[in-house]
Image (tube, helix red, strand yellow):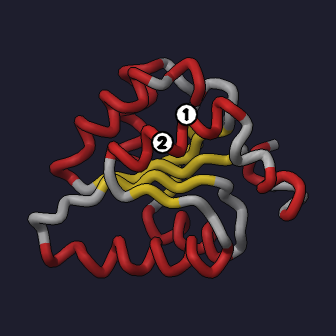
C-alpha cells in the first residue's frame, strides 16, 4: 500500500511520534511525505520515505496513487483549513481512507495491519510509477 504523510507545523512532532510507534506496520508499505515532515519521520524512524512537495501530494491523490492518507491537522490554525478541505475532498472523490488526527490514524493503521484495507488492491490495481 502507498501511504501519504502530511502534517501542519504544530503537528509534525506528533506525526514523528506516531510513525515511531507504528514503524513496524509502516515499514511493510511505501511511505511518501511532504518534504519537512518526511525528513523528520525518516530521521527519527529510519523508514525510507519518498519526499514530495505538498501540492504534488494533492495531484497524486487526485490520480488515486495513494491508498491511505494521514494528514495531521492543526485545528487552531484557521488559515490552514483550506488545505485539509482540499485533501479531504480529493480522498473522498477516490475512496481513499483519510485521517486528519492521531486517533483516526491509529484506527486506520491498525486496520491496515489486519488487512482491512486490502480492498484497495482489488478495486484499484495499478502500477505506481514513483514506487519503482
Residue found 31% across the figure and 28% down from its top = 17
Q: Is residue 33 left or right of residue 9?
A: right
Q: Which residue is mark 2?
A: 107
Residue 124, image x and y in percent? 84, 63
Give the answer, above or below, for where 86 lies relative to 47.
Answer: below
Label 2 Cα neighbours within 10 Å, binned few <14 / some 14-19 / many ≥20: few
Q: Residues within 10 Å of mark 1 (few under 14, many from 20)?
A: some
For the residue labelled by badge 1, is the local secondary structure a helix, a strand or a loop?
helix
Pointer 1 residue? 110
Residue 5 seen anywhere in this rendered image of the structure: yes
Q: CA distance from mark 1 to mark 2?
A: 5 Å
- Seen at 58% across and 30% down, the residue is 26
Q: Position of residue 104 (x, y in %)?
A: 40, 49
Residue drawn at (10%, 64%), measured in percent from left and top?
76
The residue at the point 14 percent across, 76 percent down is 78
In this view, the residue in front, 106 or 15, is 106
Where, by quadrant of the figure, is residue 43 drawn?
top left
Q: Is residue 112 above or below residue 82?
A: above
Position of the C terminus by quadrant: top right
Amino acid at each position: 500500500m502507498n501511504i501519504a504523510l502530511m502534517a501542519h507545523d504544530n503537528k509534525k512532532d506528533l506525526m514523528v511520534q506516531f510513525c515511531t510507534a507504528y514503524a513496524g506496520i509502516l515499514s511493510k508499505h511505501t511511505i511518501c511525505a511532504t518534504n519537512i515532515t518526511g525528513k523528520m519521520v525518516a530521521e527519527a524512524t529510519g523508514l525510507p520515505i519518498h519526499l514530495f512537495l505538498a501540492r504534488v501530494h494533492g495531484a497524486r491523490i487526485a490520480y488515486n496513487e495513494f491508498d491511505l492518507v494521514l494528514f495531521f491537522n492543526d485545528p487552531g490554525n484557521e488559515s490552514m483549513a483550506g488545505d485539509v478541505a482540499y485533501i479531504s475532498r480529493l480522498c473522498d472523490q477516490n475512496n481513499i481512507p483519510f485521517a486528519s488526527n492521531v486517533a483516526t490514524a491509529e484506527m486506520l493503521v491498525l486496520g491496515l495491519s489486519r488487512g482491512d484495507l486490502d480492498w484497495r488492491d482489488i478495486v484499484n490495481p495499478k502500477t505506481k510509477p514513483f514506487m519503482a
